[in-house]
Image: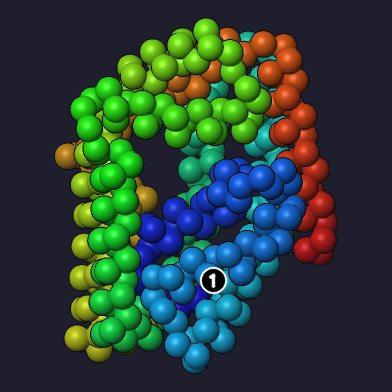
Amino acid sequence: MKKSNMPQTFLQRLSMLFMLATMVVIAGCTTVKFSYNHGDTLLYWWLDTYVDLDGDQAAWVKKDINNLFQWHRQTQLKQYSAILTKAQRQLAGDVTQADLLADYKEVKTYTEALAMRAVPDLTDLARSVKPEQIGQIEKKFNKNNEDFRKKFLKGDLEKRQSARFDKSMDQFELWFGSFSRDQKAILRKASDARPPDSEIFLAERIRRQQKIIALLRKVQTDKLSKEATQKEVTALMRDMLDRFEAPDRKAFFDSYVDATSKYILTAIKIATPEQKAHAQKRMQGWIDDFNNLAADAK
């Protein structure tokens, strides 16, 4: 897809479309299959809100997105089904924090494979972006940052923690269904035990955006060749994928992953048999959808 404009932002959206969070993104949708079958269109629309693609770009961007989805359907969906099947077994047994961390690392591996697969397409897009489109991207970044500040950085610590908790509960309730007041009180305590993260995540977001804009301007100003551009895009992608290990952030991210995995484990441990059955049923529906989608790609 000819794009360099936003590897990490783009990667996040790919992850939301390709991974289980697809169901959160599309409100009211209960099957992966419906979401996934419309994912190429949704991704194109999302990308267009950033770049404002022109007529020439639109044609091959749509084709590249379709090809990326086809690759993903043929090679990755069986892996997602396997992850969910393992999660079902864990939910039925005595799941541990170590299990959750191993699952996280496995999902991260597939996300990285997707990201690197997209690099050639991102390279093409980077080389096609025009000055006014870079301005559009920057404007969109700024708007998103302001929206983030309003949602997660407004008010005192209590209000910020409440906003973060509400966001996580949307995801928990997708999996488990409704939680009781007492359960929510336990989860709120576990949520608040996580290190404050909104300011750091905003700083990381801005850092990514600045690198993306700088890369786009460099490609345009220096008129980089395709080979040189792909090298730059690959380096930026690796920088973003490896950010959790960066010396200036590793301690925070290690603490964040540890606390978040404990938070998820708390939700699993306090879930009632009925809530776990709800999660098992939800996962089975997604497993069936992944398997059917993979079969349709043959």
Measured as percent of width and height from the top left, residue 195 is found at 28, 24
Q: Name the side, left or right, on which 101 lies relative to 75.
A: left
Element under disc 1: helix
Q: In this view of the protein, which residue sits in the foreground, 242 or 269? A: 269
Q: Residue furthest left?
A: 248
Q: Residue at horizontal 68%, vertical 47%? A: 29
Measured as percent of width and height from the top left, residue 63 is found at 60, 80
Q: In this view of the protein, which residue sits in the foreground, 78 or 262? A: 262
Residue 81, picture quadrant: top right
**Residue 245 visible in the picture:** no
Q: Residue at horizontal 29%, vertical 30%? A: 160
Q: Which residue lies furthest to the top in this view?
A: 182
Q: Residues within 10 Å of mark 1 (few under 14, many from 20)?
A: some
Q: Is 100 located above or below residue 123 in the figure?
A: above
Quarter in which the C terminus is drawn:
bottom right
Q: In this view of the protein, which residue sits in the foreground, 4 or 35? A: 35
Q: Residue at horizontal 61%, vertical 47%? A: 27
Residue 194, picture quadrant: top left
Q: Residue at horizontal 72%, vertical 34%? A: 283
Q: Name the side, left or right, on which 251 lies relative to 282.
A: left
Q: What residue type is labelled 1?
A: Tyr
Q: Name the side, left or right, on which 296 lies relative to 243.
A: right
Q: Is 284 located above or below residue 259 in the figure?
A: below
Q: Which residue lies furthest to the bottom in this view?
A: 56
Label count reads: 1
Give the labeled residue for mark 1. 44
Measured as percent of width and height from the top left, residue 222 is found at 20, 86
Residue 44, picture quadrant: bottom right
